[in-house]
Image (cartoon, rainbow, N blue to C red):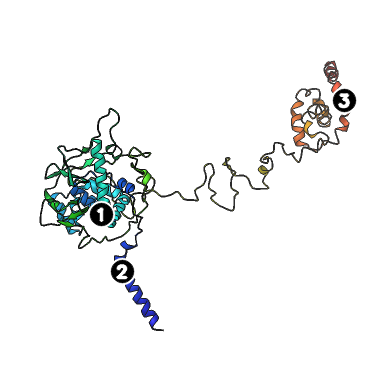
Amino acid sequence: MRRKPFLAAVAVLLAVLCAHDVGPALQAQNAPPTADELDQLLAPVALYPDSLLAQITTASTDPQEILDVDNWLQANPDLTGTALTDAAQAQGFDPAFIALVNFPQVIQMMAENVDDYAAIGDAFKADQGSVSASVQRLRAQAYASGALRSDSQMKVEVQQPAPNQTVYVIQPASPQIVYVPQYDPAVVYVGPGPGGPAPVIAFGAGIAIGALLVDNRPWGWGGWGWNWGSRRAYYNGGIWVGWGNPYRPPNYWYRPRPVMWASRPGYRGNWRYRPPNYRPPSYPGNRPGIRPPYHKPWGPNNRPTGYRPSRPGNGGSNPPSNRPKPGNRPNPTPGNKPQPKPGTGRPQPKPGTPGSQPQPKPGTTRPQPKPTTPRPGADKPQTQPATPRPQPKPTTPRPQPDKPQTQPVTPKPQPKPASSRPSSQPKPATQRPQAQPKPAAQSRPAPKPKPQQTSQPQ
């Protein structure tokens, strides 16, 4: 019974000790790219100087470090020259990144396309020969199109170490200033059109590499390059096989994602293919040591290449799910009042109130009959407003017992009380049979001869 808790504690201890080292090994590995796919990945950087290209390919073997160095550069925009390289070395970065901190625009490009460079790093670790063959293939196409030529920024040498092998070597034109090429892969690897000019390669501002011109440091500029005969990259004067004391990221939050091959030129070997919404690589700035905050630093909450939200700069939250629909008012006391119908916005009265009965039902046009209207006219309830108007005129005998002397004086204002009689006396059923002799309507001319009025006072 005592062995079970002991074995469980040992297992937990081993898991804690090995989690830090096993993290990178647990990352998903993609299948090795084909020759055409590798050309697509290397096309944006294949025309870089040999030393800079060797730094990029070896740095791609640790995509998490790419993001960490990019964050660190944004947090230290004022460091330049020797102070920049010394601070990067104090952070424990690998030699390739210590050299690349002098090219902040290159680090930013790699961070924004970290999935592509992670695939380059996997291919480089698996087979350096396939990577070097792809670089030479691309350089041969750019040379055939007329784009790759020597100028004041770079020097291009065409070598032939073997009868059937042609090698294109690119070096900076100045030993102390490096110009980063800027070009569109959909143009430089394709020959000129009929009668059109040859494609050209542009350059940004030159970057001084005085801080890298040292011989006693493994990240020194002179120790980087390619041995095209053996198809291997080297650093510090030897073939690259890994770092002696590799950098260990504090947090392994990057996870590789599949590369979208149809989103860049060269898809299936067709360099005239331009994907929809394709934009050639661009570089925000080229001055050494200056790192403007062009984007928010990468981190667990701000991940590049598909990890960020769809809306750039998204800092808001999703709307609550219980938000009322447009046109409806929220019910302050649920359960007491019924919810209003959509589109009306008016609360319905409670059942049993006087205002609830005359409201028509939705979808019906027939008015509901009033409970008091059928009593005076049960035969034709709809014609009641027409029949009572001629009938109140013969109801003159009602005021006769009250004021018999005012009868001849008030025949004209009689229609006024006629409008109030149906409302004040709802049951005139006993008096209507008295008014059946309609000569009362003919007796109107009787009061007109006024000699009778004069005879009464005699």
Could you say whether the residue bearing mark 1 is in a helix, strand or loop? helix
Within-10-Å neighbours for mark 1: few <14, some 14–19, many 20+: some
Residue located farthest toward the right when viewing the structure as drawn: 437
Residue at mark 3: 438
Q: Are marks 3 and 1 in contact (CB under 8 Å)?
A: no
What amino acid type is highlighted by mark number 3?
Answer: Lys
**Mark 3 or mark 1, which has the lower sequence index?**
1
Please indicate, yes or no, whether residue 298 appears anywhere in the rendered image.
no
User: Measured along the vertical axis of the image, is residue 113 above or below residue 199?
Assistant: below
Could you say whether the residue bearing mark 3 is in a helix, strand or loop? loop
Q: Quadrant of the C terminus?
A: top right
Q: Position of residue 310 (x, y in %)?
A: 39, 46
What amino acid type is highlighted by mark number 1?
Answer: Gln
**Mark 2 or mark 3, which has the lower sequence index?**
2
Could you say whether the residue bearing mark 2 is in a helix, strand or loop? helix
Q: CA distance from mark 2 to mark 3?
A: 117 Å
Q: CA distance from mark 3 to mark 1?
A: 123 Å
Residue at mark 2: 18
Q: Position of residue 132 (x, y in %)?
A: 24, 50
Residue at mark 1: 128
Choose between 299 and 363: the one closer to the eye.
299
Please indicate, yes or no, whether residue 215 appears anywhere in the rendered image.
yes
In this rendering, which labeled residue sits more in front, label 2 or label 3?
2
Within-10-Å neighbours for mark 2: few <14, some 14–19, many 20+: few
User: Measured along the vertical axis of the image, is residue 403 above or below residue 254?
Assistant: above
